[in-house]
Image (spheres, helix red, strand yellow):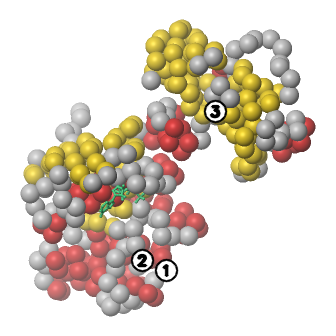
Amino acid sequence: MTSSPLLRAHLVVDRPAFRLDIDLEVASGQVVALLGPNGAGKTTALRALAGLTALSGGRILLDGEALHDLPAERRPIGVVFQDYLLFPHLSALDNVAFGPRCHGAAKHEARRVAAAWLDRVGLAGHAAARPRQLSGGQAQRVALARALAVRPRLLLLDEPLAALDAHTRLEIRSQLRRHLADFDGVTVLVTHDPLDAMVLADRLVVVEHGAVVQEGAPAEVARRPRTDYVARLAGLNLQRGTATGRHVEVGEILFSVAEPLDGPAFVAFAPSAVALHRHRPEGTPRNLWQATIDGIERHGDNVRIHLDGPITAWADVTPAAVADLDLVPGRRIWAAVKATETHAYPA
Ligand SMILES: Nc1ncnc2c1ncn2[C@@H]1O[C@H](COP(=O)(O)OP(=O)(O)OP(=O)(O)O)[C@@H](O)[C@H]1O
């Protein structure tokens, strides 16, 4: 059985040099991540859902109810902002109680609800602490508790982990994941961190230049990128060409691919699948091209070689290979990929 989506939004925001125009459908209990580069329009979309930025067009329906007609404070939403926006002069408890208070709860009741939420996020012992006495991870959990304490039907998270250091981030990411799993409303989260998106979201919506360029389950988006931005996130080389059976023509290069298809096609392959040779290797002329090295950088334990030429691509090689092949910027080199290591799909 497929339940009808809880959130159906068409968000249009016009600015002098920018236009956001995206459709969003999110089912209840689902977490959708808006992922995209800086300036893509993610925060604008979130603020439009929250009622903090006016729509130029479109609509927002939550359970069939028109939210776009409601002012921000009357929308059934909880928001966690990137920098949390906790009130510095209020205790953690009163910060969380603020939400229910705004929704009309009596002071005593608001504090009871707040205490229960602080307990759920593991901060019962910090109820009296002021925000400046909390660590980044604790402040993040207070902000989450405050957003959830109003029992929202729509939870909006703007870069919820961006303010945390790497170690705290790891821990808070998995805690947040558990809280999101328990939340039965709609969650929309904005991030430009692919790992946050992969771990936290059931579905990715990739936004570039104010438009949706790709959406789907995280693994599917990562496996079949449709833009250079998504390919970079997924760490894959992406080429676009024309397929005939088991061959895809990309400019002057003919790729043999594992899956047959016809028509406009993408070919994706990992940088680690690219083999480099000083001299033209014997055998098949397919999946082979001559490139010029135009950059070399460390990549984990390996070295990432940027290749220019008929196509641009990355190759990951060991430091030993860099020495053996004398890989230096400007050198001409042969690059090859095995057909079995390519992944082809319709463009
Ligand atoms: N208040 C504003 N007034 C005018 N233009 C704005 C305003 N806020 C954002 N913009 C512009 O709107 C576009 C989208 O910005 P937005 O902040 O939504 O992108 P984003 O995807 O969230 O990026 P980031 O990851 O950098 O936060 C950008 O071109 C930005 O410069």
Disc 3, disc 2: CB below 8 Å? no
> In the picture shown, does residue 183 fall above or below 30?
below
Q: Secondary structure at mark 3?
A: loop
Q: Is mark 1 within 8 Å of ligand 1?
A: no
In the picture provided, is 101 more to the left or to the right than 312?
left
Residue bearing mark 3: 312
Quarter holding ligand 1: bottom left
* Amino acid at the residue labelled 2: Ala
Can residue 203 be seen here? no
Between residue 37 and residue 100, name the one nearer to us. 37
- Which residue is rendered at x = 15% and y = 63% of the image? 75
**How far is the residue under mark 3 from the one under mark 2?**
44 Å
> How many angstroms separate mark 2 from mark 1 (CA)?
6 Å
The answer to which quarter of the image holds residue 295 is top right
Q: Residues within 10 Å of mark 1 (few under 14, many from 20)?
A: few
| Mark 1, secondary structure of its residue | loop
Image x and y of residue 307, in percent: 70, 35
Pinpoint residue 184: horizontal percent, then vertical percent. 27, 54
Q: Earlier in the sequence, mark 3 or mark 2?
A: 2
Q: CA distance from mark 1 to mark 3?
A: 44 Å
Inspect the image, locate mark 3, and give the three-letter code of the amino acid beneath it.
Thr
| Image quarter in which the N terminus is found | top left
Labels 1 and 3 touching (C-beta < 8 A): no
- Above or below — where is 173 with respect to 134? above
Which of the pair 196/284 is nearer the observer?
A: 284
**Observer-nearest of 130 and 115:** 130
- The kind of residue on which mark 1 rests is Ser
| Pointer 2 residue | 139
Between circles 1 and 3, the one closer to the viewer is 3
Residue 135: assigned label: 1
Circle 2 sits in a helix, a strand or a loop, which is it?
Answer: helix
